[in-house]
Image (spheres, rainbow, N blue to C red):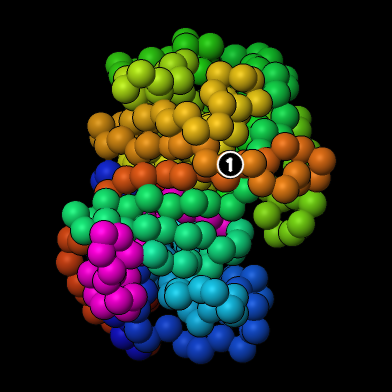
Amino acid sequence: MILSTVEMHTGGEPTRIVVDGWPRFSGKTLLDKRREARERFDHLRRGLMLEPRGHDGMYGALLVEPDHPEADLAVLFMHNEGYSTMCGHATIALARWAVDSGRVARREPETIVRLQCPCGLVTARVASDGTVRFESVPAFAYALDRIAPTRTWGPVTVDIAYGGAFYAFLSADSIGLDLSSSPMRAIVDAGEEIAEAAAKAVPIAHPDEPDLAFLYGTILTDGGNGADGRPSRNVCIFAGRQIDRSPTGSGVTARMALQLARREAKLGDERLFESCTGAVFSGRIVRDAAPVGGRRSMIVEVGGRAHQTGEARFRFDDDDPLREGFSLGL
């Protein structure tokens, strides 16, 4: 078996786009295909994401046939542990690739790309210089000032918000860390432990789709709000111990929902958010959306840039004992 991919990155965070060679799905809807990918084809995910073809920080996007009538493309997001419901950095990469490759015809001054994700339809706009802005699914603050007991720091206070996935948020200095100077291993250890504690302390439910109802990761912030042209740094730890090298598009969406809930931002406001690589995403609250489970929700526009790094053809030989990938679990 040979799988063909396009390799891209957004702010340093990889997106391995699977463009050819994946077996056909029998499922009709995108969520059907997501479940089928877990049940029938998970060995291919592991083989592409993990060593020797990938690594524990690899991220993938599998193109599939859309079932949404307005979608240009449909995608299943994947990583070292499984399958995401939404991914902003990969959406930025996919939108640029769709236009650069001719999959979606280029328009001036910008091209609209409609991407069906497991969490819903996402509309992206690709400018002539390759910059991408996208409007994600309705975002909302889920829980504020909730206590999560941890082994290392005792009870910590977290906010939980949804931006296509659920995240637990807290300021790094609340647990004695500094996102500019603390060792990354300490930040990863904290993100993993707090995600586990928050998931136990705050039951999560999504009123529209049970498959979306889980805590995806932890986002540690520098305590700033990204206003006045000064980016606020955040680091997202997800899928256990995976570090998002980008500012995290779904996390930016969720952060804007939190700022609106705390009256730190209003409709139309734009904020800037910076990752551990120095890459910057913008976030702007565009408009209110229909309430989700009785909670106020909004549409957030996220902006950033992606770049192509190469193309690849990966073999899966039957006699290769490591064809399904491995992780050293560092």
Name the spot of residue 278 as percent of width and height, x first.
25, 32
Using a 10 Å C-alpha cutoff, classify the residue at mark 1 as few (fewer than 14 neighbours), some (14 to 19) or many (20 or more): some
Tell me, yes or no, if residue 300 can be seen here. Answer: yes
The N terminus - image quarter = bottom left
Residue type at numbered disc 1: Arg
Q: Nearer the viewer, residue 287 or 295?
A: 287
Locate residue 60 relative to residue 65 in the image: left or right: left
Q: Nearer the viewer, residue 137 or 145?
A: 137
Label 1 SS: strand
- The answer to whether 202 is drawn above or below residue 4 in the figure is above
Tell me, yes or no, if residue 166 can be seen here. Answer: no
* Residue marked by disc 1: 287
- The answer to whether 251 is drawn above or below residue 209 in the figure is above
Q: Which residues are magenta?
A: 83-111
User: Which residue is depicted at the point 52% across and 41% down?
Assistant: 286
User: Which residue is depicted at the point 21% across and 58% down?
Assistant: 128
Name the spot of residue 267 as percent of width and height, x first.
55, 32
Determine if the magenta segment contains residue 230.
Answer: no
- The answer to whether 52 is drawn above or below residue 222 in the figure is below
The C terminus - image quarter = top left
Name the spot of residue 162 as percent of width and height, x first.
62, 41
Name the spot of residue 24 as percent of width and height, x first.
51, 89
User: Which residue is depicted at the point 42% across and 58% down?
Assistant: 124
